Image (cartoon, helix red, strand yellow):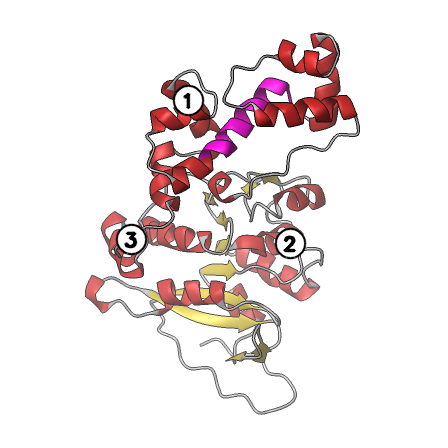
Amino acid sequence: MPTPATTAGPRLLPAPRRPAAAHRVAVLAYPGMSVFETGIVTEVFGLARPEFDVDWYDLVLCAEQPGPVPVVGGASLHTPYGLAELATARTVIVPGVPDVTADPSPELITALRRAHRRGARIMSICSGAFALAGAGLLDGRRATTHWRYAELLARRYPRVEVDADVLYLDDGDLLTSAGSAAGLDLCVHVIRRDHGAAIANAVARRLVIPPHRDGGQAQFVEAPVPADPDDDRIAGSIDWALAHLAEPLSVAQLAGRAHMSSRTYLRHFARATGTSPIRWLIDQRIRASLALLEETDVSVEQVARAVGFDTPVTYRHHFGRVMLTSPSAYRRAFRTGAGQRA
C-alpha cells in the first residue's frame, strides 16, 4: 500500500486502502485551479460502474502538498495524497494550469518523469500541456492545447509539435486535449481504448455527450479581427473586400483598389497579413457563413452563394479544410434559438 505523504500542520486522515487490481488514475490538483476539469475526470473515471462487469478505475486526487487545496470560488479540495502517489499511478492526468507562463515545480517535473519512465499513460487537459512540456515529456511529440495558448506553447517549447486544430491527440503514452470541455472527449476516448466502443458509448450517453464529436478546435475559435496593416492601401482594399464578399473577387480587383500592380499587391498583402489574398478571401467567406448557419434556415447551397462561393461543392471543400467539419454538422452543433433534446 502506498504511504501517503505528510506535511506539518493539521493531522491528515490516513489514505484509504486502494484496490490492488484496479487501474489507478491520479489527477493533479493545483491551488487556484478551476474544479471543472477535475470534475470531468471524477465523473468519467471516479464513479463506480458495476453494470459493465469490467475492472474499472481507481481514482485518486494528488497534490504537491497533501492537505487542503484552495480552488476557484473560495472552496477547497482535501487530499491525503502527494506526488509519490501520482508517480506510481498507471494513468496520470494534469488539468489546466493556472499560469501558462510559469514553469512546473522541480518536484512535479520529477514526479511526471518518474511516472513516464515507469510506463504510465500521461494525459493533460487544456493548458495542462504546459506542465508536460515543461517536464520535457512532449519533446519531439505531437500535442495540443486550448487554441488561445497554442502559439505560446509552440513558442515556449519549440521541440513540441503543436497541433491547434484538433480536440485531442493520442500519441500513445502521451495524450493531450484542447479546451476544458475537450477533456471529456479525451476521457471517453481513453475508455474506448481501454474497454471498447460499447462501454465508451454507454458512458457518453450517460454524460449526454456524443461518443465522438466531428471537427476540431477551429469551429470554436473566435472569428479573428481583420488584419489592420500599417499600409493604408492594403487596409482599404481589405475593408472593400469585406463589404463585397458575395461578389466574384480577383487579385487584380483588389490590387486596383490599392492602386498597385498585382505582383506588388501580392507582396504587400503577404507582408501585412501573413497570407495570400485568395487564402484570406476564402477564410473570410467561411467565417461570414458561420452566422448564416447558426442563425438562419437557408440551405447550404444558399449560404455558399451568399458568401461568394461559385458552387456548394467548393464551399463544402473549403469549409472542411478550415473548420474540420461539414457545414451541416456545424449547423447542428451551433444552431441558436432551438432547444435540443438530451
Q: Tell me if mark 2 has few (under 14), some (14-19) or many (20+) residues whose alpha carbon lies within 10 angstroms of its own.
A: many
- The residue positioned 49% from the left and 60% from the top of the image is 92
Q: CA distance from mark 2 to mark 3?
A: 42 Å
Q: Is residue 241 left or right of residue 307?
A: right
Residue identifier under label 1: 305
Seen in the image, is 236 located left or right of residue 208? right
Which quadrant of the rendered structure holds the N terminus?
Answer: bottom left
Spatial CA distance of label 2 from label 1 is 50 Å
Q: Which residue: 37% across, 45% down?
A: 335
Observer-side mark, 2 or 1, equals 1
Q: Position of residue 37 (x, y in %)?
A: 48, 63
Residue type at numbered disc 3:
Gln
Q: Earlier in the sequence, mark 3 or mark 1?
A: 1
Residue 74 in the magenta stretch? The answer is no
Query: Residue beneath label 2, please?
Result: 135
Closer to the camera: disc 2 or disc 3?
Answer: 3
Q: Residues within 10 Å of mark 1 (few under 14, many from 20)?
A: some
Residue 336 x %, y %: 38, 48
Is 324 in front, or is 123? Answer: 324
Residue 252 percent location from the top left of the image: 64, 9
Q: Which badge, 2 or 1, is on the more N-terminal residue?
A: 2
